[in-house]
Amino acid sequence: MTNASYAQTGQPDAAQIRTQVERMTKSEIFANSPQLSAFLLFVVEALLRGKSERLKGYTIGVEVLRRDVNFDPQMDPIVRVEATRLRRAIERYYAGPGASDAVVIALPRGGYVPRIAWRGTPEAEVAEPSARAKPPRLLPGNGLPTLRVAPFVVVGTPGPLVIDGEALGSKLAEAFALFEMVNVVAAAPAASGGRYDYRLDGALEYRGEGTVCLRFKLVDKTDETVIWSRTLEAGCAEAVPEIEQKVILELATTIVQRFGIIWSHERRRQLATDAGDPRYRAMIEVGESFRSFDPLRAQEELERLTTLDPSFAAGFSYLAAIHAVGYVHGFTDPGDGTALDRALKFARRGVELRPHSAFAYHILFIVLFFRGETEAARAAAENAIALNPYDLAMRADYGGRLIFAGEVDKGMEMLRNTAPSGTILPAWTHFYLFLGHYLRDELAEARFHAGQLINDTHIYGRLAQALIARRDGQVDEARRMIESITTAQPHWKDDPRREIGKLITGSRLADRLTRELAAAGLT
């Protein structure tokens, strides 16, 4: 639709629409989500310029989401996922700061062409989010997918090395449940009502010379698709408990840990549609928002869901993380002195609801660490590790924060044992490793990890790049990184030592980084 047709039909004109887009992208809902702002601006501009036929998944993926020319929207759901996020952000905007705006913009489901109308007109009824919409219906239970550990198949005749398949399956089920991201059943289907979403099949194949081949595959029950498989070899040189421990650690870390196989599979399914339980969908969305350093986007949904379900323990823990990380990383008001108090309240509520939850204690540890309550934070971290000794990501987080507290060698030792090379690590782990290597003058390693911090919204990634550029004598690059920090978060100009100290709790370490950043141009 062109500008002229808007005028002819009495719809808002191009200038009014662009003003409305500007108002929306400057609101707190969009201000910390530059990708959503870019998505909204792109689709609206295409409509205004009469090029709505270009609003296809491939075009948006390449021109807005910066995928390469080989991007396949059928294989990569990023456009559908971001469109769903945009629809929800628009709904939150019009339910909040835009409740009285005259121009209503929406992105109807099923496509990427926006619908724009004056509020109160029949055309706006489709575009305008319904304030009368019923709250989501929460089914009994916790909303998590269910994983069944099927009885293992035994092939061949056992030799000197004998592994009890039934015992191993039981231990795997117990370990999987500690991650709190799936409901686990280890009994026959009839005993669990016959319902499950994923199935772990296993086989123990005994070979000659006392060796055993352990084969595993994860099956999506929806269509019986194998979505992951793994083969492990064991021999007589290893004791059975060591073999079992290796298998449990490998499978638990890969399959059920946050950002593992089931998480990734459900991410595509849950975020591309509105299917499934909204509590689980919110958990996935907030986890993804932390990886993209855009945690505020899930806050309102979690607040709504914890109101609807006061027993939603993980929801309270995630809210604690959002308030704490938002304050420390500058996504919220940097002068908000109550943010960490709110975070502590939510973290304690999560622990109260699930006193045996490793995840709840992990979040409590992070909040206490940010509050400077070091001994209490250590106790919470040790409790979390004791509750789930298989969660390597949790141990890595503890090691990284020990580095922040100035215990560099101890923190690096933990990271060495929990963040193996060759794996894809989250940005915060790369920053832990960067800082540890940098402080020990291991510049080649520090340079590598700084180079992995490419997220534009990760302030500490830019800080790492500024520090390494200064050490490499790249003065202009260091100043460019400093400028990008102060442009994104101007309060860093006022008191950089205070901002650094929010994350780096070791005083001497924070002082040193402040001096070195000043030498790089942060004054």
Image (spheres, helix red, strand yellow):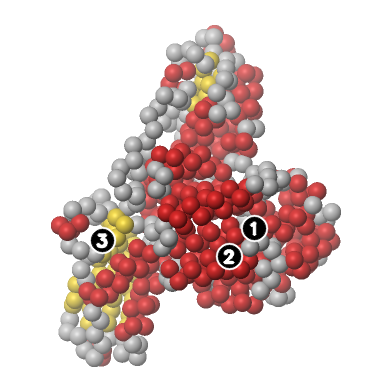
Q: Nearer the viewer, mark 3 or mark 1?
A: 1
- Placement of 432 over or under 235, stated as above or below: above
Residues tagged 1 and 2 counted as in contact (Cβ below 8 A): yes
Q: Position of residue 377 (x, y in %)?
A: 58, 65
Q: Position of residue 215 (x, y in %)?
A: 28, 72
Label 2, secondary structure: give it.
helix
Q: Can residue 31 be seen in this snapshot? A: yes
Q: Residues within 10 Å of mark 3 (few under 14, many from 20)?
A: many
Label 3, secondary structure: give it.
strand
Q: Residue at x 73, y 50 (%)?
A: 485
The amino acid type found where label 1 is placed reads: Arg
What residue did someone put label 2 on?
377
What residue did someone put label 3 on?
185
Residues tagged 3 and 1 counted as in contact (Cβ below 8 A): no
Q: Residue at x 69, y 63 (%)?
A: 505
Mark 3 or mark 1, which has the lower sequence index?
3
Residue sitting nearer the eye, 354 or 207: 354
Give the quarter of the image for residue 134. top left
The amino acid type found where label 3 is placed reads: Val
Q: How many angstroms separate mark 1 from mark 2 (CA)?
A: 9 Å
The amino acid type found where label 2 is placed reads: Ala
Q: Residue at x 42, y 68 (%)?
A: 388
Q: Residue furthest front?
A: 352
Report the number of discs.
Answer: 3
Label 1, secondary structure: give it.
loop
Q: Residues within 10 Å of mark 1 (few under 14, many from 20)?
A: some
Horizontal placement of 275 versus 324: left or right? left
Instruction: Specify the label residue 36 is tagged with.
Output: none
Q: How many angstroms separate mark 2 from mark 3 (CA)?
A: 33 Å
Q: Position of residue 506 (x, y in %)?
A: 71, 67
